[in-house]
Image (cartoon, helix red, strand yellow):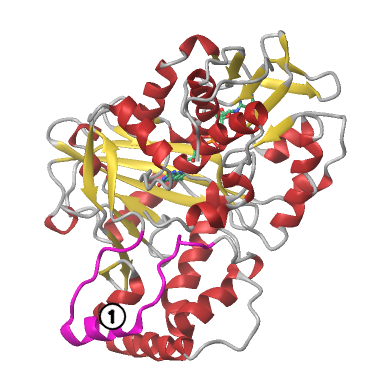
Amino acid sequence: MTSTKSKPRTKKRCVIIGAGPAGLGAGWRLMELGHTDFVIYDKNPYVGGLATSFVDDAGFTWDIGGHVLHSHYPYFDRMFETVMNNDYFTHQRESWVWIYDRFIPYPFQNNIHRLPVKALHECLKGLYLAAKGNPKKLRTFADWITASFGPGIAKHFMLPYNRKVWAYPPDKMNYQWVGDRVASVDISRIEQNIKTKRDDVSWGPNAVFHFPKKGGTGAIWEHVADRFRSHIMLNREVMSLDLKKKVVYLSDGSHDIYDVLFTTMPLDVLAKKQKDIVLPSAAKLHHSTVTIVGIGIAGTPPETLLTKCWMYFPENIAPFFRATVFSNYSRFNAPKGAWSLMTEVASSRYVPLPQGDIGALVLEGAKQTKLLPKGAKIESLWTFRSEYGYPTPTLNRDTYLLQTLPALEKFGVYSRGRFGAWKYEVSNQDHTFMQGVEWVNHVLQNEEEITVHNPAKVNGVKR
Ligand SMILES: Cc1cc2nc3c(=O)[nH]c(=O)nc-3n(C[C@H](O)[C@H](O)[C@H](O)COP(=O)(O)OP(=O)(O)OC[C@H]3O[C@@H](n4cnc5c(N)ncnc54)[C@H](O)[C@@H]3O)c2cc1C
């Protein structure tokens, strides 16, 4: 997809806003092409954006939510191997759903034999119905769920879980983003699993994944940034932009002039920081907020969690929608003699965070769902809130994006990345890094940007 030998044909000055995976992807490719007239500004004192990691006072390492790599690109894989230099673990993906006071392996539909009998029958009946095909035209994500899995699984797992993770109603979301992100249905395999009571835990594109030995997910991006630190200006927030004059104004009072601008700040924020175009659609984009509560615990994980990676929680018994046994990703994520659980709680302007101390509520939920053994000694309770967590694929999202992104591009401003392009389906680390790489190839070599314009093509590649 990307030719590594080609030389740039222009001398454009590139200004990049954000040192997350997307901005660093742009920097990586510019360096590779020998185009050194670029600078990356970030308001944070660290690189990595949402894919950074922190070490708390008790010595536990935390990501901003469970980060699992499942790359769609050989180019991304080569970058990873180059910077990580074998300094990573490879894990078998093992995810579970906590429901009806028990764990069920994921994908849920393949393992309904573990459900209470009544729920099992409802789910199976629904699967047969779904297999017959659906005459109704699909409009929403909720429609897609029911058509794909049947009303039983929709009721017991898919609808409650998705309401919780998105903090937004699935019947107000589109379904075109789904691609390979949600496991599909294989009825004969499900019947066989029920007959033999067989657990079926591996599926799809991320059956194994790599994780840095030390430093959490953020270690990847620290290593990438190490290749061009002198081009990265931290603690520099872009306060406003003059699109006509092609100037960015920074929090330290300085300014910078560009030929082309790559911005990864949230698109709704960008729209407000400039006065040259009216962009009302940007304000209609919806996002969720994630609150991460990390629990550091003395001792070793209970038997039931020893090999688990992450678990989904569709029920209201716990405020979190997902919990990761983060010390299973790397023993260095916890100090010696301790282990760690990382939980994620979603909220939005539709669904507020539960009232009360979120740390205490998560601890109670972890007890109720048997994640925390009785008498567990808590060594750390780490909380982090990211206002921008998930870019919601609402029904009109694509219309809003079409009314916004091309208008900016007319001024040489390319809004990309998880919240710059607002496309959840291409908002993981591999996708966003490649959005940066492809942008460079576009502005310097006139190549097409595939990831941002054609997510289905990228996600459809079986690897
Ligand atoms: C809860 C959660 C779970 C995730 N799980 C996974 C996973 O399992 N696998 C995976 O691959 N990915 C995962 N991701 C996605 C991953 O974190 C993103 O792909 C990635 O961080 C997005 O990169 P980005 O560069 O587009 O944006 P960001 O990481 O958001 O970076 C944008 C940067 O721009 C900076 N910025 C914003 N405004 C300004 C301004 N005005 N001036 C200067 N700088 C500014 C910010 O400080 C930030 O550093 C997850 C994300 C979240 C939130």
Q: Where is residue 189? Give x, y as percent.
A: 28, 80
Q: Is residue 202 magenta?
A: yes
Q: Main SS type for the magenta part?
A: loop
Indicate yes or no: mark 1 CB to ligand 1 under 8 Å: no
Question: Magenta segment range?
Answer: 178-204
Question: In the rendered view, does 153 fall on the left or right side of 12?
Answer: left
> What residue is shown at x 46% (from left), y 51% (from top)?
345
Q: Where is residue 255? Give x, y as percent.
A: 73, 11
Q: Where is residue 2? Give x, y as percent.
A: 50, 35
Q: Secondary structure at mark 1?
A: helix
Q: Is residue 386 magenta?
A: no
- Dot 1: within a 10 Å radius of its alpha carbon, few (fewer than 14), some, or many (20 or more) residues? some
Occupied quadrant, residue 221: top left
Query: What residue sits right under mark 1 in the picture?
Result: 189
Depicted 317 relative to depicted 336: above or below = below
User: In front here: 320 or 249?
Assistant: 249
| Residue type, mark 1 in image | Arg
Occupied quadrant, residue 413: top right
> What residue is shown at x 36% (from left), y 34% (from top)?
78
Question: In the rendered view, does 317 fall on the left or right side of 88?
Answer: right
| Residue 340 in sight from this viewpoint | yes
Depicted 305 relative to depicted 268: above or below = below
User: In front here: 97 or 449?
Assistant: 449
